[in-house]
Image (cartoon, grey):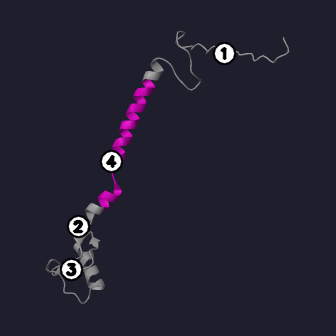
Amino acid sequence: MTGTNEIIKIHVMPQRCAVSPTQDCRGPDLVCGQQNIQSQQKNAKKQAGQKKTQGHDQKAAAKAALIYTCTVCRTQMPDPKTFKLHFESKHPKTPLPPELADVQA
């Protein structure tokens, strides 16, 4: 040595894969060859299944169920019985709409 500190670079060769000796293994968590293809197919199937289940939206379904709207306060109700009870309790001085006249509360 000449008195200066020399940096020694050590080149580490990647390990050869046990399944396919021509490929380099990138790490212990990666798989090679047929296992990789099967894993990708399984993952694609799983992702497609998750997209189908995400299609159901509870908020949209609940909003679609609210089909009666109060003409005074614009509150939405799911059925005419609830609508009539709401109207009688919240708007007692307002005359009942004709569609609620025959509803049994």
Q: What separation in Å lies between label 3 and label 4 (alpha carbons)?
A: 37 Å
**Three-letter amino acid code of the residue under disc 3:** Gln
Determine which quarter of the picture holds residue 53: top left
Q: What separation in Å lies between label 3 and label 1 (alpha carbons)?
A: 84 Å
Q: Is residue 61 magenta?
A: yes
Decide which of 5, 32 is in the foreground and name it: 5
Q: What separation in Å lies between label 4 and label 1 (alpha carbons)?
A: 49 Å
Look at the image and give the residue range highlighted in magenta: 38-62
Q: What separation in Å lies between label 2 and label 1 (alpha carbons)?
A: 70 Å
User: Is disc 4 placed on a helix, strand or loop?
Assistant: loop
Of badges 4 and 1, nearer the viewer stands: 1
Determine which quarter of the picture holds residue 25: top right
Do the residues bearing badges 2 and 3 touch, measured as CB atoms within 8 Å?
no
- Pointer 4 or 1: first along the chain: 1
Circle on res. 12: 1
Q: Is residue 15 left or right of residue 2?
A: left
Answer few, some or many: residues within 10 Å of disc 4's Cα (few below 14, many 20 plus, some between 14 and 19). few
Residue matched to label 2 = 67
Answer few, some or many: residues within 10 Å of disc 3's Cα (few below 14, many 20 plus, some between 14 and 19). few
